[in-house]
Image (tube, rainbow, N blue to C red):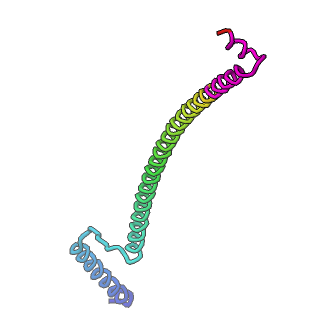
């Protein structure tokens, strides 16, 4: 054997054993790769899930607040409308009652004034009957 053959022989043998070893390893390992996520990937996924959960919670809170506010506004509007209508109706009743009372007071005052005037006329007539030269005195003499 020559020197060049001795140098090449170990390299060929190393390659042969290496290729045999690689093919044996390739046959024994499964080709499906089920790699576990790394800590960084798990942290990213957990962070995304937390952000999504926070967004869902915020949407629910916003919807609940909006719905509650709308209900409160509607209730306030209904209450205001009822109060307005009650005030309007009560004001009309008070106005009508005042008008009726004022009319009755005017009528009573007029009646009292007429009665007083009639009383004064009849008293004046009686006094005039006793005074000579008045129209009442002349009328009383003729009767």
* Residue 39 location, quadrant: bottom left
Q: Residue at the location (50% across, 39% down)?
A: 90
* Residue 54 location, quadrant: bottom left
Q: Is residue 12 above or below residue 135?
A: below
Q: Is residue 112 left or right of residue 85?
A: right
Residue 58 part of the magenta segment? no
* Residue 31 location, quadrant: bottom left
Q: Residue furthest right?
A: 133
Q: Position of residue 13 (x, y in %)?
A: 29, 84
Quarter of the image where the N terminus is located: bottom left
Q: Position of residue 38 (x, y in %)?
A: 37, 76
Q: Relative to the observer, which residue lies in front, 32 or 118?
A: 118
Range drawn in magenta: 115-141
Q: Relative to the observer, which residue lies in front, 16 or 98?
A: 98
Q: Relative to the observer, which residue lies in front, 88 or 98?
A: 98
Q: Is residue 35 left or right of residue 74?
A: left
Q: Residue at the location (38% across, 90% down)?
A: 3
Most common SS among magenta residues: helix
Q: Position of residue 61 (x, y in %)?
A: 42, 60
Q: Residue at the location (45% across, 52% down)?
A: 72
């Amino acid at each position: 054997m020559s020197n060049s053959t001795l140098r090449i022989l170990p390299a060929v043998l190393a390659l042969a054993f290496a290729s045999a070893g690689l093919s044996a390893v390739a046959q024994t390992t499964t080709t499906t790769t089920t790699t576990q996520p790394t800590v960084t990937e798990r942290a990213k996924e957990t962070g995304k899930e937390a952000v999504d959960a926070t967004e869902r919670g915020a949407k629910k809170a916003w919807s609940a607040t909006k719905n509650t506010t709308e209900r409160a506004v509607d209730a306030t509007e209904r209450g205001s409308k009822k109060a307005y209508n009650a005030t309007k109706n009560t004001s009309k009743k008070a106005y009508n009652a005042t008008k009726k009372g004022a009319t009755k007071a005017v009528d009573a005052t007029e009646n009292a004034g007429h009665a007083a005037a009639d009383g004064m006329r009849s008293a004046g007539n009686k006094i005039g009957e006793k005074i000579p030269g008045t129209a009442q005195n002349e009328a009383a003499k003729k009767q």
